Amino acid sequence: MNTTTRPAMKTTVYTARPIAPPALKELRETDDAGRTTSPFTDTEGGAPLRCCLRHSEPGERIALVSYAPLRRWAAEMCVDPGAYDEQGPVFIHAEECAGPDTGALPFTNSHRTVRRYSADGHILGGRLVEDSAAFDEAFTEAFDDPAVALVHVRAVEYGCFYYEVRRP
């Protein structure tokens, strides 16, 4: 009998992290730019929701808020992101939701940028991801660098934040 021993494959599962519930609670009142949140009924659907990492459905109550993802992460880690602190628009449900209902990576149907950050909150570079099959490779490449603490997945056309992935 001929047997072949194969080396174990390295399997890593990368998890998209939605905006955390405590931050969502704050954003539903006042956004990171200090503006009062103004919910509205989404008549068309299709808005990329960062609370549950799916697209909105027509008729859902949502809000467009200014969110500073690196600022909030840096505060949690007790570091100062300095000039890399930025805020931008994100859609969230106007009321509390159940969060993501799947472990699949969301919003991979278009070109995205995977932006890398160090443990002290400074940008370390990024990579353009042009198809959904390349996300795992982009995350593996990022986290193979021991200096990378987290990555942001962002829209190419507007630079909007979609979600964060932390070191597994």
Image (cartoon, rainbow, N blue to C red):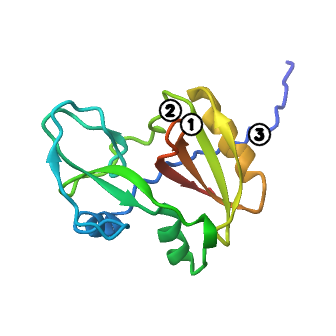
Q: Which residue is mark 2?
A: 108
Q: Is residue 125 above or below residue 158?
A: below
Q: CA distance from mark 3 to mark 2?
A: 28 Å
Please tell me how crowded label 1 is: few (under 14), some (14-19), or many (20+) other residues with Cα within 10 Å: many
Whether residue 11 is visible: no
Q: Specify the amino acid type for callout 3.
A: Ala
Image point (25%, 52%), residue name:
98
Q: Earlier in the sequence, mark 3 or mark 1?
A: 3
Query: Which numbered dot is residue 8?
Result: 3
Q: Specify the amino acid type for callout 1.
A: Arg
**Is 154 placed left or right of 46 in the picture?**
right
Q: Earlier in the sequence, mark 3 or mark 2?
A: 3
Query: Which numbered dot is residue 82?
Result: none
Q: Are marks 3 and 1 in contact (CB under 8 Å)?
A: no
Please tell me how crowded label 2 is: few (under 14), some (14-19), or many (20+) other residues with Cα within 10 Å: some
Q: Are marks 2 and 1 in contact (CB under 8 Å)?
A: yes
Residue 9 placement (x, y as % from top left): 74, 38
Q: In terms of secondary structure, where does tag 1 sit?
A: strand
Q: CA distance from mark 3 to mark 1?
A: 31 Å
Query: Which numbered dot is residue 112?
Result: 1
Q: Specify the amino acid type for callout 2.
A: Thr
Whether residue 73 is visible: yes
Residue 65 placement (x, y as % from top left): 31, 56
Q: Residue furthest top?
A: 1
Please tell me how crowded label 3 is: few (under 14), some (14-19), or many (20+) other residues with Cα within 10 Å: few
**Is 105 placed left or right of 92 in the picture?**
right
Image point (51%, 28%), residue name:
110
Q: Is residue 4 above or below residue 104?
A: above
Image point (62%, 73%), residue name:
82
**Is 143 placed left or right of 7 in the picture?**
left
Residue 85 placement (x, y as % from top left): 55, 66
Q: In terms of secondary structure, where does tag 3 sit?
A: loop
